[in-house]
Image (cartoon, grey):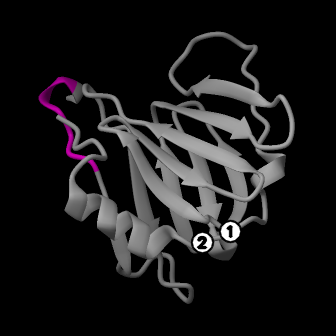
Amino acid sequence: MTLGFSDKHRLAKLKAEMETWELYQVEIDKYHVMFWFENGHCLLNVAYRFEFESNHSSESYVYDVQATGTRKFLCVEPILREQVKSVVALDERRLALEFNQGKLIIHDSPKMRSAWFYKYDPRDHNGPLHWLVDDEESEEEW
């Protein structure tokens, strides 16, 4: 079972930590899209789905990480090197990170570990995490 985004304590923790994080780079592999913030010291790892909506153009899409096929589209250039202005739970399963140039909407699946947030020690990424917000694993994943 995953936790969703509607719990007020979880949302307060995300807001307190993530507002002002600057999006540094985005990495893609077969099972995750990794959004690195703060010069690579903070990570939002998405394993399910996210949306991007640009404020100043017609750029709007949903990126399904687990979808099959070879024609996936990803463009987050408008929010690269931008700070998160606000963190808002749109509903239980969607969290919006709002930037000046657009918003990134993280979707949470009720059936799988969908997204997790880590803040690493800037001096030692192999050391203990400074901060994290994680989903629970469901029985079905194993």
Residue at the image point whose x is 36% and y is 75% from the top: 131
Residue at the image point whose x is 31% and y is 67% from the top: 12
Q: Residue at the right extreme?
A: 57
Residue at the image point whose x is 82% and y is 50% from the top: 78
Residues marked 2 and 1 touching at CB (< 8 Å): yes
Q: Residues within 10 Å of mark 1 (few under 14, many from 20)?
A: many
Describe the element under mark 2 as helix, strand or loop. Answer: loop
Q: x, y percentage for residue 91?
A: 35, 37
Instruction: Determine which of the numbered discs, if any, sits on residue 83 in the image.
Output: 1
Label 2 or label 1, whichever comes before in sequence order = 2
Q: Residues within 10 Å of mark 2 (few under 14, many from 20)?
A: some
Vertical position of residue 130 compared to residue 86: above or below? below
Read off the residue under disc 2. Answer: 21
Vertical position of residue 133 compared to residue 101: above or below? below
Predominant SS of the magenta segment: loop
Relative placement, left or right, of 80 versus 103 is right
Question: In this picture, which residue range is highlighted in magenta?
Answer: 135-140
Please say whether residue 119 is visible from this viewpoint: no
CA separation in Å, label 2 and label 1 = 5 Å
Q: Of 136 and 95, which appears nearest the observer?
A: 95
Q: Residue at the top extreme?
A: 69
Residue at the image point whose x is 42% and y is 59% from the top: 117
Q: Of 43 and 61, which appears nearest the observer?
A: 61
